[in-house]
Amino acid sequence: VQLVESGGGLVQAGGSLRFSCAVPGRSFSCYAMGWFRQAPGKAREFVASINWRGSSTFHAKSMKGRFIISRDNAKNTVYVQMNSLKPEDTAVYSCAASERISGASGSPMLYDYWGQGTQVTVSS
């Protein structure tokens, strides 16, 4: 299963970015989807997740209210809208798909497929 991410880049503090993650194929609507990030020298961190239908979401406490996950099953794509970005949001962001769970989850161990990762750099 291929996950193709887009939307990263350089942004000033306070700015916004939207990531997309496309998952070609018929099974996208069966997957729970998640976003994770990893900053240099730090462990992978959960960002947000969404259930297969898009009716339930789960956001990391530190990002709740700033980051919003959504999905469009007709387009086989999951999104994360990131607002009010801070320098500490600088990281490589990756999307992930799970065929083992249908609900939203913050545990990376439950995800089966991962995107290649996209760099986000927030300048102060």
Image: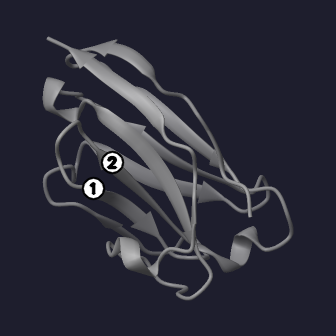
- In the rendered view, does 25 fall on the left or right side of 68? right
Residue at screen point 30% across, 35% down: 91
Which amino acid, mark 2?
Arg
Q: Which residue is mark 2?
A: 37
Which amino acid, mark 1?
Arg
Q: Is residue 44 visible?
A: yes
Q: Which residue is mark 1?
A: 44
Tell me residue 52's x, y (percent): 60, 76
Question: Callout 1: helix, strand or loop?
Answer: loop
Residue at screen point 59% across, 41% down: 20
Tell me residue 33's x, y (percent): 53, 66
Quadrant in the picture for residue 16:
top left
Question: Tags 2 and 1 in contact by the CB under 8 Å rule?
Answer: yes
- In the rendered view, does 38 fall on the left or right side of 70? left
Q: Is residue 17 above or below residue 30?
A: above
Quadrant in the picture for residue 27:
bottom right
- In the rendered view, does 27 fall on the left or right side of 97? right
